[in-house]
Image (spheres, rainbow, N blue to C red):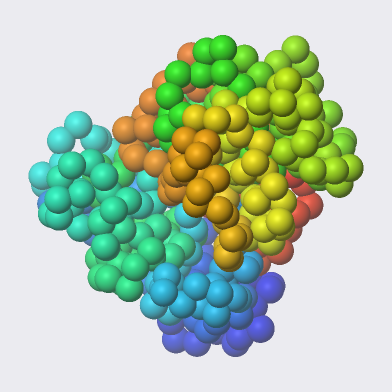
Amino acid sequence: MTTTSSPRTPTSDTADLGASSAPPATMLAARQHERGEPLLIDRVDRPRATGTDVIVEVKACGMVPNLANVLANWETWFPHEPLPPRPATFGLDPVGVVHEVGEKVIGVRPGDRVYVNPTRSCGACHPCADGRLQECHYWVFAGYFAFHPDGVAMFEKYPHGGFCEYMLAPQAALVKLPDSLDFRHATRLGYLGTAYAAVKKLGPLGGKSLLVHGATGTLGVGVTLVALALGASRVYAVARGVPLLERLQALAPGRIEIFSNTEGGTAEWVRSRTGGLGADFHVDTLAAVGSLDSFKDAVHAVKRGGTIVNIGGAAGEVGLDPKYFMDNALSFIGSAWFTTAECMELVGLIESGVVDIQSVLEPKAWPFEQINDAINGVTSGDGGFTSYLVEL
């Protein structure tokens, strides 16, 4: 492999990129050495599997649309959520084949096709023991960032994300993939799983209506697909661009209504469609650059007793009135990622055809040696209908 996007001259730890495969003791990994710099493809020691850990030979890895901002700005924006120590191997949504298993692994064999849930936690605290891994102080996204400074310890134990040939992962992070789900589409499971976990928190959807705010983005398209599959009677899809909204509506014309919030307020529009009551539920998917005024407006599109779940990246103070929430019996939930069990459930829905991603989503792939081009190319598709990835 070669890389043409790096400004560095290869050093002693930089790969001899002419070989077609790594020697048994080493592997190729795309790493960021300094903040704001492009990734370099380096030759590094390959991890080994012990205990309940496995080694996955990575075949593809999803590309987070926000990755360029994370690599350049995260430490300024969110200093309380540390990145992996550099040189760091990023890559959030890896899929591949189990290559090696530790001596205590049960139920997983070399050759199994898997998605690797990137979340890691200590496994020993009360939240972990209770299956609430997101509440662990050590909970991190391997290959992305930690949610608490304590999480740096997990980066030391699992130093590689998915932008490498072989990665170490705990057995409990693996989701087996059916042969009918190709690797390219499986790299979208992170965003789809996030959507699935959020929709599950709403409870039964039969006869219920759902506002999806930011509906044409990567998360919003996933929420819409999952909500339709789980029985939502009406989806109010709100975003900016009309062409992608129309494409979304075409998935279920009798159940999806669309609105561009460039034409007015979301709350006013939703209430005009619901006899003044509002939607039963609201899932907000606005990205980091999303308008907080738009977010606040959408909160008021929910009926009395409704539930709002936030899975987007918009950050900042929005000045919500607590008495309004009290008087209207509203619930506000922050939902981060998903459990491995929830991803297993989602894969079952995809395998059965209840959630159809392979005819709706369009993968856009780059070869591994063009990883910097991939990072910079994640706005080149059709919003949430495009899945971005690199292939190894």
The image quadrant of residue 13 is bottom left
The relative height of residue 299 versus residue 152 in the rendered view (above or below) is above
How many labels sit on residues?
0
Q: Position of residue 318 (x, y in %)?
A: 60, 60
User: x, y (%) of residue 137?
Assistant: 26, 62
Position of the N terminus by quadrant: bottom right
Front-most of 105 and 304? Answer: 304
Residue 325 shows in this picture: yes
Q: Residue at x 42, y 70 (%)?
A: 81
Q: Is residue 23 visible?
A: no
Left or right: residue 19 compared with residue 235: left
Is residue 146 placed above or below 211 in the rendered structure? below
From the viewer's side, name the closer residue of 318 and 117: 318
Looking at the image, which residue is at 55% across and 30% down?
304
Task: Name the spot of residue 326 as percent of width and height, x first.
Answer: 47, 42
Q: Is residue 353 above or below residue 48?
A: above
Residue, x 78% and y 52% (percent of image)?
380
Instruction: Please say if 191 is above or below 91.
Output: above
* Lateral position of residue 138 relative to residue 193, left or right: left
**Of residues 373 and 281, which is closer to you in this image?**
281
| Residue at 43% over, 79% down | 86
Q: Estimate the x, y position of residue 294 in percent, counting from the top left.
A: 72, 51
Q: Is residue 36 left or right of residue 200?
A: right
